[in-house]
Image (tube, helix red, strand yellow):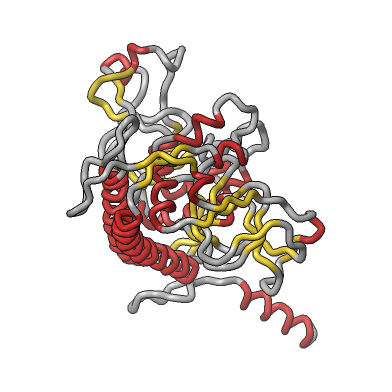
Amino acid sequence: MNDKNLGSQKNKLKKIKKSPELRFKGFSDDWEQRKLGELGNLNRGKSKHRPRNDSRLFGGEYPFIQTGDVAKAPLFLTEYSQTYSEFGIQQSKLWDIGTLLITIAANVADTTILGIKAAFPDSVIGFESTSCDVVFIKNYIDIQSDLLKRKAETSSQANLNLAKLKEMSLNVPKLKEQQKIGSFFKQLDDTIALHQRKLDKLKQLKQGYLQKLFPNLGENIPKFRFAYFEDVWEQRKLSEIVKITMGQSPNSENYTTNPDDYILVQGNADMKNGRVFPRVWTTQITKIAEKNDLILSVRAPVGDIGKTDYNVVLGRGVAAIKGNEFIFQLLGKMKQNGYWTKLSTGSTFESINSVDIKNAQILLPSGKEQIQIGYFFQLLDNTIFLHQSKLDKLKTIKKSLLQKMFI
């Protein structure tokens, strides 16, 4: 073998990673490649009885986990939406705490670990560890979720089979290092879950205040009021109070990815946490919204409301509204109460038009009370935003660490 070939072989060996970029002290052994089926037992959940919706199956004391429950669960699943009866559990199986759940239909490659004994259907696979740390394995599968989704059989509904999961290759360290990594990410997940609960409580608190600081249907004063405000609220059309601009999409050939061009807002995908989030740009100006305008989604999902911190071009999926903080919160309450959805019901494609928006009936207090209500919700929204930012930062940190602590 000449020097050139020898150098080529050395370069190939260097490219084969045997350990992650970041490791805990005291661990130096190379990681080994194993198949998931070698590390534990994988089996599909059971729900033999037909029809699946037989009422005799449900309503008992045994948790019956759905794919949707797995999708929204934290590290350990303890909440569920359905239960089995004695009749139901007899045709299924009750799995032990610590079983790793992997969805293989509908929401492919979502994972969680049972924090309770539970049953689940054959759209979920249960992994019971025999020689590995289950939290480590869960995080490894989460890293590979996009790959698993691509491997899902192409059909009207994505589906990942048991055989493919058993053959899935993983790079794993010795058990002690797995446990160390698993414990670390469990603590991080617990911190993320704590911040998520705080954020959820703040959002629920806001929803409650929206119902109490604005009048209910058929009423003209709210349940709660700030001191010294007693006048009834006045009914007006939205178009009498604010300027409304309907969007008009530029030609698609003028779309760009150049941040020096004009920001294009086409719909809900261009907003994040109630703010315009630049994603697409355009060289063509059609209809515009100015900085601090409100942005209302007029296509599915109808009624989502946000603000823009930029001058933007409006696509046909949105409208711009020049309104104050009170109007912003009022539109949020209308969305919460399903006002816009009722207007769009019955259409083939869920949407609202300029007439729907301009003729929307709203109740208005005095200017001073509008300012007081708007300021209150602005402070609450700022607190929610800070908690959301902390949560997003933690999730970003976790994503980065997963890439550096696994192969």
Could you say which is closer to the camera, residue 198 or residue 331? 331
Could you say which is closer to the camera, residue 190 or residue 374? 374
Could you say which is closer to the camera, residue 183 or residue 252? 252
Residue at point 42% right, 28% down? 121
**Residue 186 seen by the camera:** no
Hey, which residue is sitting farthest bottom in the picture?
3
Q: Position of residue 367 (x, y in %)?
A: 35, 56
Q: Quadrant of residue 334?
A: top left
Q: Position of residue 254 (x, y in %)?
A: 79, 61
Q: Is residue 91 depicted above or below 10 in this figure?
A: above
Q: Position of residue 292 (x, y in %)?
A: 51, 64
185 horizontally vs 227: left or right: right
Could you say which is closer to the camera, residue 115 or residue 168? 115
Q: Quadrant of residue 349?
A: top right
Residue at point 46% right, 64% down? 399
Hey, which residue is sitting farthest left in the picture?
227
Residue at point 40% right, 39% down? 235
Residue at point 45% right, 13% down? 50
Q: Is residue 36 depicted above or below 9 in this figure?
A: above
**Residue 327 seen by the camera:** yes
Quadrant into which the N terminus falls: bottom right
Q: Position of residue 321 (x, y in %)?
A: 54, 53
Hey, which residue is sitting farthest right in the picture?
253
User: Exactly how many numbered labels are in the figure?
Assistant: 0
Q: Is residue 261 depicted above or below 53 in this figure?
A: below
Q: Is residue 152 depicted above or below 306 in this figure?
A: above
323 horizontally vs 164: left or right: left
